[in-house]
Amino acid sequence: MTPHRSGCPINLTLETLGDRWSLLVIRDLMFGNRRHFRELLTHSEEGIASNVLADRLRRLESARLISRRDDPTHKQKAIYSLTEAAIELVPLLAQMGAWGRRHTPASRELSVRAQLLEEGGPKLWSKFMDELRHLHLDAPRPKVSVFAQLQSAYEAAVAEAGSHK
């Protein structure tokens, strides 16, 4: 194991998450509910290469941000799940999305979820985290599906963008 540059929590977080792909893989597990390698590979907006995806999944599992288990429906497939540590990244990702909406040329369809999370604030983040615990950690199902709200808004934005072409 390589030594850390320092014990600073920001440095250590960047050493864990700061490469080009790790947060995007977590994003796709979190917001896209993509749980299989093939889904993560073929639905990547950024076009991740299969060897890079395999490496990031191994790194994230080693860092205890995701877990991997065999898929009971297919011997050669695995199901990836977020761990509690990754679920606790929701506020960080919400803040990154909010910053990106304000300071980058983000597309409407790819930023609508970030907008809803920013507007909903910590209360919505907490509800979303509870739902992620249900989806990934077998916690009880929440009464309201934040995931469904975010997905519906995304699909509506995609449809709207398609109708303007």
Image (cartoon, rainbow, N blue to C red):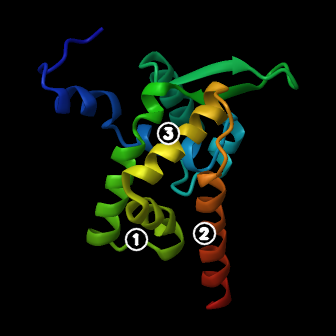
Residue found at x 63% / y 20%: 68
Q: Residue furthest front?
A: 143
Mark 2 vs mark 3, foreground winner is 2
Q: Which mark is residue 67?
A: none
Residue indicated by mark 1: 106
Q: Which mark is residue 153?
A: 2
Callout 1 crowding tier (Cα within 10 Å): few <14, some 14–19, many ≥20? few
The numbered mark, 2 or 3, whose residue comes first in the sequence reads 3
Q: Which mark is residue 26?
A: 3
Of the residues shown, which amino acid type is indicated by label 1? Ala
Of the residues shown, which amino acid type is indicated by label 3? Ile
Q: Is residue 27 left or right of residue 68?
A: left
Q: Position of residue 154 (x, y in %)?
A: 60, 67
Q: Is residue 96 above or below residue 115?
A: above
Label 3's element? helix
Residue found at x 42% / y 51%: 123
Q: Position of residue 33 (x, y in %)?
A: 64, 44
Of the residues shown, which amino acid type is indicated by label 2? Ala
Q: Is residue 77 visible?
A: yes
